[in-house]
Amino acid sequence: MKSMPPLGEFAIIERYFARQLADRDVLCGIGDDAAIVNVNEPIAVAVDTLVGGIHFPDDFPPADIGYRVLAVNLSDMAAMGARPRWCTLALTVPQSDAAWIEAFAAGLFGLAEQFGVALIGGDLTRGPLTASLQIIGTLPGGRALERGGGRPGDDVYVTGSLGDAAAGLALWHSPASESVDALRARFRRPVPRVAAGLALVPLAHAAIDVSDGLIADLTHLCGQSGCGAEIEIERLPISGELLAALPADETYRCALAGGDDYELCFTAEPAQRRAIEDALAACGTPLACIGRLTEGRDVRVTRGGRRFDLAAPGYTHF
Ligand code: ADP
Ligand code: MG
């Protein structure tokens, strides 16, 4: 990376973060003490933080940090069935490195433009590398997808494929190959399922995004819905890249317990199956039905009809 002279705080904000906004609902953007937006609907608000060395390896490219801090928040909007609109960014960097910030901003704004999200404010401080982004979305028609709406008998679905990001992180320093590079890309640049989330609002009972691992996140959904679940290993969507990179048993572990895929896990009445398939096909999102919600509180996994035991249920910080 080319080296540049250090820039002051306001010069950095001006040069890299303050962009002309086309959004007429932003009444006051970057540059004042707070941003002002105009909303006529209920809003969904979420915040997520990425800490250097904890959420990503030390050699993680700055453009991917910028991308990822927005992507994980977009995924929270997707899981609520919200339409993401605005975000604020609290960025802490160890030094004023213009090339680093330029790359970070390129990753962030590339994704923001793709999803029509405007950066309307933030904070910039010096310290250990931390990027925290808050996002605001609107709920069309005032309806949302919550975790607590699942009912026994619901089908359980996931979008996309599971386990790729966890494998990509585990293989972060492995030699390059087509499949390993694709897995690493899944960790570096998760695709938020925003269109799918919006399409599911009238069709699904409950939803969550898979950030800590399928079983861990499905357990949260079940806890809030007051039910259990039964998942069949044979029905898990496992990508060709993951199958090429790891032995079958390891792929199951990644798919069940690995985090960071940011796919949606949701439940719906069996009668909605056709409508759900059509709705997700219309937004180009792959879909798999992996099991069902049950009475009771257990989240079980079966393989060949028999109970399959999982040692570690997912990532927790403490
Ligand atoms: P204050 O002292 O009132 O908190 P700051 O001096 O921190 O304001 O920030 C000045 C303006 O720049 C504010 O509008 C703030 O929202 C914006 N801002 C600061 N840091 C960032 C950033 N990393 N990205 C986007 N906007 C930022
Ligand atoms: Mg401030």
Image: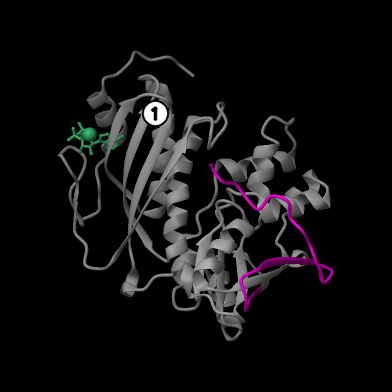
**Residue 54's spot in the image, x, y percent?**
53, 34
**Magenta-tinted stretch:** 292-318
Q: Quadrant of ligand 2?
A: top left
Residue 307 magenta-drawn? Answer: yes
**Element under disc 1:** helix
Q: Kindly indicate the quadrant of the structure image that contains residue 133.
A: top left
Above or below, comparing residue 287 to residue 182 in the picture: below
- Residue at the bottom extreme of this rendering: 271
**271 or 24, which is in the foreground?**
271
> Is residue 219 rendered to the left or right of residue 114?
right
Q: Disc 1 marks which residue? A: 102
Q: Is mark 1 within 8 Å of ligand 1?
A: no
**Is residue 184 something one can see in this rendering?**
yes
> Is residue 259 rendered to the left or right of residue 97?
right
Residue at point 36% right, 29% down? 92
Count neighbours of disc 1 (C-alpha within 10 A) and say few if under 14, some if 14 to 19, many if 20 or more.
some
Q: Kindly indicate the quadrant of the structure image that contains residue 275.
A: bottom right
Residue 231 magenta-drawn? Answer: no
**Residue 8's spot in the image, x, y percent?**
26, 20
**Residue 76's spot in the image, x, y percent?**
44, 56
Q: Amino acid at mark 1?
A: Glu
Residue at point 55% right, 27% down? 58
Residue at point 70% right, 67% down? 300
Residue at point 67% right, 48% down? 164
